[in-house]
Image: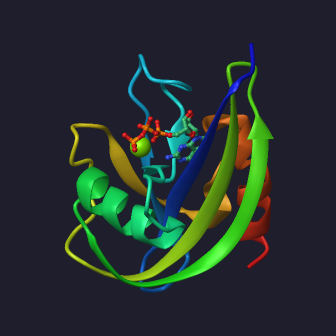
Amino acid sequence: MDKKQLWISAGIILNAQQNQVFITQRAAKAHKGGFWEFAGGKVERNETAEQAVVRELHEEVGIDVTGLEHFMSLSHDYPEKSLKFDFFLVTNFEGEAFGKEGQPGKWVDIAALEHADFPEANAVVLDKLKLR
Ligand SMILES: Nc1nc2c([nH]c(=O)n2[C@@H]2O[C@H](COP(=O)(O)OP(=O)(O)OP(=O)(O)O)[C@@H](O)[C@H]2O)c(=O)[nH]1
Ligand SMILES: [Mg+2]
């Protein structure tokens, strides 16, 4: 059987100084449960990646995005599904980021981000972020 293919849009939420990012922890029972992530989710039918990330960040971390730029696209094959990602840098937003769905959330120095805390697909994103 063919693997499920999904398009995911996620936001790398930057603080004003752009030296920290806001990350959230995936629910234990979810795919990659317990790992930290950049909030986001599936791009819905008739939505652009940009529209999806704005919607997801409102739903998941309670912010209204007012400034964003595309950071990178990538594809990653997990044994259980095939994912295509668009990651955006969120440079401006209204509201205070928090785990709106009850999930843990925290601001972390970009320099202190650990590959092992994130799903495999995020490795190249973290590498590029650390080089900014
Ligand atoms: N949001 C997000 N998902 C990631 C990241 N890295 C990564 O491998 N994923 C994977 O991408 C998939 C989509 O994430 P998701 O769990 O948020 O999507 P979802 O089914 O909850 O959809 P929804 O958020 O639209 O309800 C999951 O399989 C997740 O493990 C990341 O940094 N952010
Ligand atoms: Mg999600």
Q: Nearer the viewer, residue 114 or 101?
A: 101
- Residue 88's place in the image compared with 107, above or below, is below
Residue 113, given in percent of the width and then of the height, sits at: 63, 53
Seen in the picture, residue 15 relative to 21 is either above or below; the reply is below
Q: Position of residue 90 (x, y in %)?
A: 47, 76
- Say how the picture is coloured: rainbow
Q: Is residue 98 visible?
A: no
Quadrant housing the N terminus: top right
The quarter of the image holding the C terminus is bottom right
In the rendered image, the vertical position of residue 65 relative to residue 33, given as above or below: below
Q: Residue at 66% x, 74% y: name it.
A: 71
Q: Residue at x 68, y 41 (%)?
A: 83
Residue ID at (71%, 57%): 126
Query: Which residue is at the front of the view, 37 or 109?
Result: 37
State the residue lying farthest toward the front: 46
Q: Position of residue 66 (x, y in %)?
A: 34, 85
- Number of numbered markers: 0
Q: Is residue 64 left or right of residue 35?
A: left
Front residue of this view, candidates 69 and 15: 69
Between residue 55 and residue 38, name the one nearer to us. 55
> Where ligand 2 lies, by quadrant?
top left
User: Is 121 placed left or right of 59 in the picture?
Assistant: right
Q: Position of residue 49 (x, y in %)?
A: 52, 65
Q: Is residue 7 visible?
A: yes
From the viewer's perspective, tell me whether residue 50 is left or right of residue 64.
right
